[in-house]
């Protein structure tokens, strides 16, 4: 049977074998994949592991702070880089989704390079790439390129660190078992997958800080209500999306145009296929009423009821 402990022992030995000298930089994002990667690398090489958290300003509320605090509590050295302004400036007004991904990937690589060049003897870069990321990026022979997941494709050739990807043979459920066996808190073990370019892919059409703020607040409400209903862990991903569609709403005795927010909640085993979640109406009702009352710019909430395929999980 599949025992996480055996894999942990093997992975740690493999990292230790390969990484005999120099520093290992771990790109962390708060997600289960990069957190597990950081812990495994730290187990293998101790203080030669350096976690780098680049805050692109596209995270969910409170995510960067919690991620950094957790890793530090484990004894891992973390360099936090506040790059919110740089990313958001470049994204402002950009409408094309692949262009957003390219900007985030490229800016990330630039900032990462700056940080790494300040770390003496940096030799390796550890990333939490999973098997499905590898497949969907077309890195596996014969697989079609569907979306350019920036954690695989975004590194320019001049980026000289050697890649360490200890999780590239694993699916998400296996990584969660490894995370649990490593003693990570449930909040991390069961954390939803979150795209590398973050909330940028959930702001459809021209990117604005206003739409970003709407998506961030709405996503928090979606997650809170699913947690309250006891279903957050049963779903694969649950989030909000905003574009430029408008709907006229009534606020008091005034009619005013507001944004349409789409709620996306899906169930999946590995993200290759996904089914929209049959969340109880009462939960959807609560999500809708909270979003329109707590985010006054929003006048309509819709629920996405198309599975993957033919749709994808993220809007773009
Ligand atoms: P789609 O939208 O293609 O998503 O059905 C499949 C899974 O991949 C995640 N995703 C991304 N992850 N960079 C990432 O690291 C990306 O650009 C990206 N786009 C989608 C998505 O959240 C889902 O879990």
Image: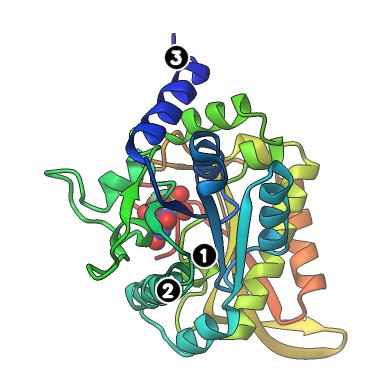
Question: Where, quadrant-wise, is the C terminus in this rendering?
Answer: bottom left
What residue is disc 2 on? 104
Which residue in the structure is indicated by mark 3? 2
For marks 2 and 3, give the CA distance.
Answer: 36 Å
What is the distance, in whole Å, between disc 1 and disc 3 at their CAs?
32 Å
Q: How crowded is mark 1: few (under 14 residues within 10 Å), some or many (20 or more)?
A: some
Instruction: Using the image, tell me which numbered label, if any, was put on residue 14.
Output: none
| Foreground label between 1 and 3 | 3
Q: Residue at x 17, y 46 (%)?
A: 143
Q: Which of 262 and 47 is in front in this view?
A: 47
Total numbered circles: 3
Mark 1: C-beta under 8 Å from nearest atom of ligand 1: no
Residue 46 place in picture, x, y as percent: 55, 40
Q: Name the residue under label 1.
A: 198
Under tag 1, what secondary structure? helix
176 sits left or right of 219 in the view? left
Q: Position of residue 10 (x, y in %)?
A: 41, 23
- The image position of residue 152, as x and y in percent, is 32, 56
Between circles 1 and 2, the one closer to the viewer is: 2
| Residue nearer the viewer, 89 or 192 | 89
Which residue appears at 52% of the width and 18% of the height? 5
* Left or right of residue 9, residue 17 in this image: left
């Amino acid at each position: 049977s599949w025992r996480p402990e055996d894999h942990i022992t093997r992975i740690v030995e493999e990292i230790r074998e390969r990484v005999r000298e120099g520093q290992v930089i771990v790109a962390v994002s708060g997600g289960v994949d990069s957190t597990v990667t950081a812990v495994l690398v730290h187990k293998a090489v101790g203080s030669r592991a350096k976690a780098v958290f680049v805050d692109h300003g596209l995270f969910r509320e409170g995510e960067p702070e919690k991620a950094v605090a957790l890793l530090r509590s484990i004894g891992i050295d973390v360099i936090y880089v506040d790059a919110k302004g740089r990313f958001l400036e470049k994204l402002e007004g950009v409408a094309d989704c692949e262009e957003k991904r390219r900007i985030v990937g490229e800016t990330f690589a630039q900032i990462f390079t700056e940080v790494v060049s300040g770390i003496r003897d940096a030799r390796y870069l550890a990333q939490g790439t999973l098997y499905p990321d590898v497949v969907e990026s077309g890195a596996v022979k014969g697989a079609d390129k569907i979306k350019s997941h920036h954690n695989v494709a975004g590194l320019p050739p001049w980026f000289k660190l050697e890649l360490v990807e200890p999780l590239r043979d694993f699916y998400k459920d296996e990584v969660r078992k490894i995370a649990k066996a490593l003693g990570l808190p449930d909040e991390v073990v069961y954390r939803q997958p979150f795209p590398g370019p973050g909330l940028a892919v959930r702001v459809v059409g021209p990117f604005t800080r206003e739409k970003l703020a709407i998506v961030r607040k709405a996503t928090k409400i979606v997650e809170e209500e699913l947690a309250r209903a006891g279903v957050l862990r049963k779903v694969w991903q649950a989030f909000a999306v905003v574009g430029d569609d408008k709907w006229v709403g009534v606020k008091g005795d005034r009619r005013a145009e507001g944004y349409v927010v789409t709620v996306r909640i899906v169930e999946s085993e590995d993200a290759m296929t996904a089914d929209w979640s049959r969340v109880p109406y009462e939960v959807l009702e609560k999500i809708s009423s909270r979003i329109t009352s707590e985010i006054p710019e929003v006048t309509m909430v819709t629920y996405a009821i198309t599975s993957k395929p033919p749709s994808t999980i993220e809007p773009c």
